[in-house]
Amino acid sequence: MSILKLDEKGRLTLPKELRESHDISEKVLIIDAGDHLKMIPLPSNPFKVLHGAFNIKKSFRELRDQAENLAKKETQIDIKK
């Protein structure tokens, strides 16, 4: 745990140990969670992180049909409620 002090412009400096242990390089996402803030490190190269994540062997038509069927099912569930 670290207690950090903001400077006169409202900035803070993360200790080196935290930056290294959470692999924080350039950017972080700050989320206002109501009573606290969440800070999520963002990758410096998001395409590198996603490499291989979208190796899909289905055709576009199959994916579209699957999405349409899912949308129909969700609509039917909402109507029944």
Image (tube, rainbow, N blue to C red):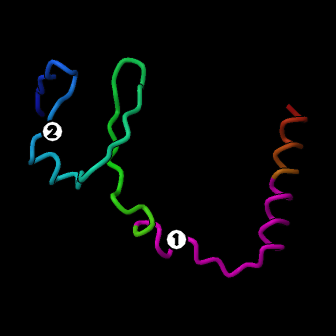
State left or right for residue 26 relative to residue 62: left
Element type at mark 2: loop
State which region is magenta: 49-70
Q: Position of residue 7 (x, y in %)?
A: 14, 22
Number of the label disc, if any, that sits on residue 41: none
State left or right for residue 45 relative to residue 74: left
Q: How crowded is mark 1: few (under 14 residues within 10 Å), some or many (20 or more)?
A: few
Q: Position of residue 60 (x, y in %)?
A: 78, 73
Element type at mark 1: loop
Residue type pointed to by label 1: Ala
Number of the label disc, if any, that sits on residue 53: 1
Q: How crowded is mark 2: few (under 14 residues within 10 Å), some or many (20 or more)?
A: some
Look at the image and say whether residue 68 sits in the magenta stretch.
yes
Sequence-first tag of 1 and 2: 2
Give above or below for 69 relative to 50.
Answer: above
Residue occupying image coordinates x 23% and y 55%: 23
Q: Distance between the residues labelled 1 and 2?
A: 31 Å
Q: Where is residue 29 in the image (x, y as percent from the top left)?
A: 38, 40
